[in-house]
Image (tube, grey):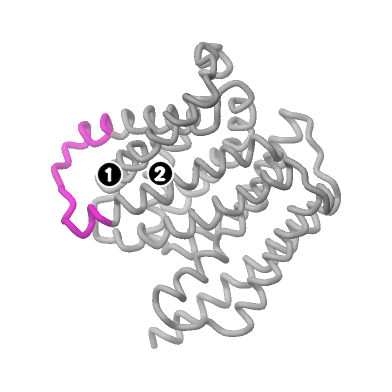
Amino acid sequence: MALFLALITIFFWGISFVATKVVVKEIPPITLATFRFLISLLVLKIVVKASSNKTKLSKEERKNAILAGFWGITMYFIFENIGVKFTTPSQASLIVSSVPIFTIIIQDIQRKRMSSLKLYLLSFISLAGVALIVFSHGLTFSYGMVGDVFILIAAFSWGMYTLYVDKLEKADNIVSTLAMTKWGFIFLIPFSTIEYLIVKPHLTYVFRPDILLWILFLGILCSGLGYVTWNHGIKTLGSRTTNNLLYLIPVVSVSADSLMLKNSPPFIVYIGGALIMFGVVRGEKLARREDLKVSD
């Protein structure tokens, strides 16, 4: 069941890159993130209330939930939404699929031990794939390249998010997800306020039927319910196994990008994506074997 729910979440997240690309044409990126997680927060409050679960987080769990919200919601969606505004959904999803590599590196630093040289070589191959995608716009400055770099920073932020979700293994899933969402939303408010004062957007676009439906899709299915099912997967299947499913996101995103927005990535992007997938999949298998040896 955990695997099934994680795969459904992957499907929604794959389409979310297209949804974000459509909405940020009319709504500023950070403002979109704030609307998205306001909706998500309301959905989660209803879920918690309906579940009659009165479990509370300990002081340490609350601290980890705050940090998870900061990295996995505030930082991730600031950089992802800005990045998608300037690059394509296909390229964004391919770069995000490099998250497991960042997870391995961050966990090694946190545990103060090095993985094998072979694992780092596979990580390098994946990052070389990321570089091909970033430079697919050419070697000269372009907004597309800036967008790809922002997506790369978002991928690192998600790796940090996973580190703190791991520490919430014993906490109630829905309660901890609500806490993360609440703090992620709170941290977004000052950033969206500054953005609003600078950009001065026309927020009436929010009520345009297609824009409103995409925002509700992002807030309810991708965030409100999506975070609950994804965090359940991390706790049940383990962070590395669950994060490995992220490499399926580009399959959904590239298909949706082609069908909905008629975007066709250049051939070099597919080469870069193949390198990322090779490094991530092989690296995941090797990392799992190394973890088993350490535990023995």
Q: Amino acid type of disc 1?
A: Ala
Q: Amino acid type of disc 2?
A: Tyr
Q: Position of residue 116 (x, y in %)?
A: 57, 84
Q: Main secondary structure of the magenta part?
A: helix
Give the crowd class for mark 1: few <14, some 14-19, many >=20 residues within 10 Å.
many
Q: Is residue 1 left or right of residue 217?
A: left
Specify the quadrant of the image occupied by residue 199: top right
Q: Earlier in the sequence, mark 2 or mark 1?
A: 1
Query: What residue do we see at 84% from left, 50% from top?
Result: 138
Q: Which residue is mark 2?
A: 227
Q: Is residue 258 visible?
A: yes
- Regarding mark 1 in the picture, which secondary structure is present there? helix
Q: Is residue 284 magenta?
A: no
Query: What residue do we see at 49% from left, 47% from top?
Result: 76
- Judge whether 18 appears above or below 184 on screen: above
Q: Nearer the viewer, residue 150 or 216?
A: 150
Query: What residue do we see at 67% from left, 48% from top?
Result: 148
- The part of the chain drawn in magenta is 45-63
Q: Is residue 105 left or right of residue 170?
A: right
Q: Which quadrant holds the C terminus?
A: bottom left
Foreground label between 2 and 1: 1
Q: Is residue 220 visible?
A: no
Q: Position of residue 21 (x, y in %)?
A: 64, 31
Q: Which mark is residue 179?
A: 1
Specify the quadrant of the image occupied by residue 169: bottom left
Q: Is residue 26 left or right of residue 270?
A: left
- Regarding mark 2 in the picture, which secondary structure is present there? helix
Query: What residue do we see at 67% from left, 44% from top?
Result: 147
Circles 2 and 1: CB atoms closer than 8 Å: no
Q: Position of residue 284 (x, y in %)?
A: 57, 70
